[in-house]
Amino acid sequence: MLRPFEKGIDGVLVMACGEDSCRSLEGSRRARMRVREANNVLEEIGLGSGRVMIGQVDGNAREPYFQMVEQLVAQAERLGSNPVKGKSNK
Amino acid sequence: MIIAERKPIEQILDMINEATTVLLAGCATCVADCMAGGEREVGILGSALRIALKRKGKRTEILEVTVERQCEWEFIEHIQQLVEKADVVISTACGIGVQAMAERYHDKAIYPGVNTTFLGLREEEGLWAERCAACGDCTLHLTGGICPVARCSKSLLNGPCGGSTDGKCEVSEEIACGWQLIVDRLKALGQLDRLQVNIPPKNWATSRSGGPRKVVKKELRDEKREQS
């Protein structure tokens, strides 16, 4: 989840199934906690919490995904551009 | 297992300082189980450091590796080439792993990426708790399998003290009274009579009070092989 931020990405949306309908049983629930962990790390290094969002909706529901992308874009705009953008270490 | 917690990233950045190549060395045993310094956590730390260093305008290269157990020579031997590439190694193993690396690679700066905290177990998801103080003189057979040294805040060998209220310790309501746990367990075992026996003062020479400790198993020492 954090690798894209090294490249200057402003936000990441993790799309998962509902916690009660995850075929990996615990997968979606654990994903939720790992998203929280990723946001804590981003906060710690000054990028701000909330750049990683999780959407837990069953795969056959399209509409909520569009809404989630819009929410992510709004959240990323609120937090500002990833300060790493344009700073290559190559 | 050995429980540890990752150090704050700012503290790790201070250790890295002006290094041009840094190796993050994880350990796939205890610190992986307590989610502090295994392969997954090395990946997270690596990303965090790369981002933080880029923000500071630094071009530090961050390498990542995780070995099965950093506390054994055979395993840390395998990463020699990577260690040689780095100016600084941040080990996310416990303090034993960090020191093993420092002994094996004695001309390399090896710094800790985690704080080694205690010997314990995972009580619940995301919650680890102390169980053993490694005092070197186990009394668990007398105390219902519950350690008074590690789990009583005062390490009393005969308890509980007057600060025990409703099964909680006076130090904090979040701490279960170790001696209440012992009494409850002895009751369940039908061994409450053991509480009538006074446990004598402990010989702390087997603990840290006696200085750095060693265990020697003579039958496993090969006199024909030169050993340090």
Image (tube, coloured by chain):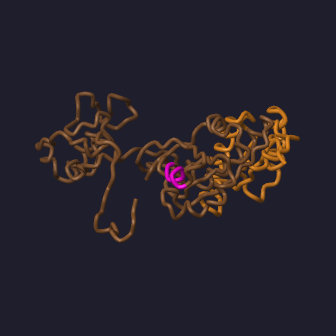
Chain colours: A orange, B brown
Which residue is at the far bottom?
A: B224
In the rendering, at what x and y percent does residue A80 appear? 83, 33
- Is residue A63 found left or right of B11 in the rendered image? right
| Residue B188 position (above or below residue B12) | below
| Camera-nearest residue between B153 and A61 | B153
SS majority, magenta? helix
Q: Quadrant of residue B169?
A: top left
Q: Is residue B183 left or right of residue A31?
A: left
Q: Nearest the camera: B35 or A16?
A: B35
Q: Residue at x 83, y 43 (%)?
A: A8
User: Looking at the image, can residue A55 be seen?
Assistant: no
Q: How many marks?
A: 0
Please name the residue shown 66% across and 37% down the image: B13
Say whether residue B188 is left or right of residue B169.
left
Which quarter of the figure has residue A67? top right
Q: Is residue B216 magenta?
A: no
Residue B101 in magenta stretch: yes
Looking at the rendering, which quadrant does residue B113 occupy?
Answer: top right
x and y percent of residue B172 in the render? 38, 30
Answer above or below: position of B36 versus B55: below
Image point (22%, 43%), residue name: B183
Residue A42: x and y in percent read 71, 39
Q: Which residues are magenta?
A: B99-104
Is residue B227 visible to us here?
A: yes
Q: Is residue B196 left or right of residue B67?
A: left
Query: Where residue B190 sits in the image (x, y, percent)?
Result: 17, 52
Picture residue at 48% right of the left edge, 47% below the top: B95
